[in-house]
């Protein structure tokens, strides 16, 4: 009974109504694994970010954020590390 109540409560939260988005950022200037770590930390510290993972090979970062998230916050987080970020694409999370 308690688990049914918990499931019902979770389904009624605003987070269940809104979808998440996957944002792909191009990141210029990454040259080593430490660069990846710095970008990941900066993005993950940004309020509202659910998940972030960058790649040295692709020179990109994939970030999961809630719908309606201010994308400028992601660019600002990357730019404040000394790298240059720009949005490549935004798509709904699968």
Image: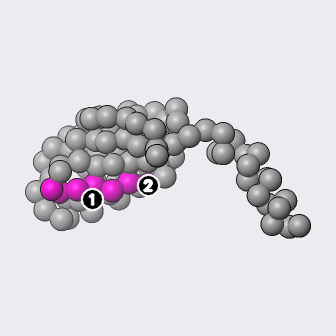
- Secondary element type, mark 1: helix
Which labelled disc corresponds to residue 17?
A: none
Splitting the image into 4 quarters, where does residue 53 fall?
A: bottom left
Identify the mark nearer the N-term, 2 or 1. 1
Residue extent of the magenta highlight = 51-57
The residue tagged 1 is 38
> Where's residue 45, x and y in %?
43, 54
Q: Residue furthest left?
A: 31
The residue tagged 2 is 51
Q: Residue furthest front?
A: 94
Q: Nearer the viewer, residue 67 or 34?
A: 67
Left or right: where 60 falls relative to 8: left
Mark-to-mark CA distance, 2 and 1: 15 Å
Q: Nearer the viewer, residue 52 or 80?
A: 52
User: Residue 52 magenta-drawn?
Assistant: yes
Q: Quadrant of the N terminus?
A: bottom right
Q: Considering only vertical position in the picture, is 33 above or below 49?
A: below
- Secondary element type, mark 2: strand
Q: Nearer the viewer, residue 57 or 39?
A: 57
């Amino acid at each position: 009974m308690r688990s049914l109540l918990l499931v019902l409560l979770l389904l009624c939260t605003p987070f269940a109504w809104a979808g998440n988005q996957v944002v792909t950022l191009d990141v210029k200037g990454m040259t080593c694994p430490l660069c990846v770590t710095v970008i990941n930390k900066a993005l993950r510290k940004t309020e509202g970010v659910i998940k972030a993972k960058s790649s040295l090979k692709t020179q990109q970062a994939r970030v999961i954020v809630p719908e309606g998230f201010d994308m400028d916050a992601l660019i600002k987080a990357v730019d404040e590390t000394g790298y240059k970020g720009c949005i490549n694409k935004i798509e709904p999370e699968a």
